[in-house]
Image: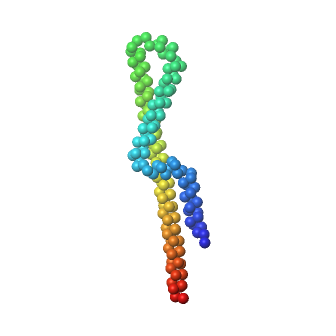
Amino acid sequence: MLNNEKIILMTKLSLYEQKSEKKQISTSRYFKGDYMSLKMISSFIYITVAYLLCLAMMIVYAADRLFASMSTTGKFTALVVVIVGIYIVVTVVYMIFCYAFYSHKFSQIRKKLKEYNGDLKTLHRIQELEYDEFNDELEDGEQEEAQW
């Protein structure tokens, strides 16, 4: 006899595992602080590389004008201060957005994993009940055979 509730639950669990097993289930290994640290460090590296690439492209594009205007050391120092200042501002703003994004993402993943674990517990209870019913039927059958 088929248990429709069990089939529906198993299908739901299977779809969740196939759709998001690699990303969300592997995230369950992390504490929030560890997950956030990992994501923030990788975001910092990405924004630094992106900024350096943009800076290199701007320098290559405007190299003759840039070097022509660098007649004194003061102008060069001012340019370096502006470049570093822009880098700091861009990095801080990007890191704030990354923190908010990954914090929200982590809480959503945890919420889905709690639902997934609850469904697993429900499935486990259903299987235990079926197993107990099966064992009771076997014991009843053995007792009837013993009476004959």
Say how many tags the image has. Answer: 0
- In the rendered image, residue 147, in percent from the top left (x then y), is placed at 52, 88
Name the image quarter holding the N terminus. bottom right
Left or right, 134 with respect to 103, comes to: right
- In the rendered image, residue 89, in percent from the top left (x then y), is placed at 43, 31
Q: Residue at x 40, y 19 (%)?
A: 78
Please tell me which residue lies in front, 25 or 66. Answer: 25
- In the rendered image, residue 114, in percent from the top left (x then y), is placed at 47, 57
Q: 60 above or below 26?
A: above
Please tell me which residue lies in front, 74 or 139. Answer: 139
| Residue 93 appearing in the image | no
Q: Residue at x 43, y 28 (%)?
A: 87
Please tell me which residue lies in front, 66 or 136. Answer: 136
Q: 45 above or below 112?
A: above
Q: Residue at x 48, y 63 (%)?
A: 121
Q: Residue at x 54, y 88 (%)?
A: 148
Q: 10 above or below 44?
A: below
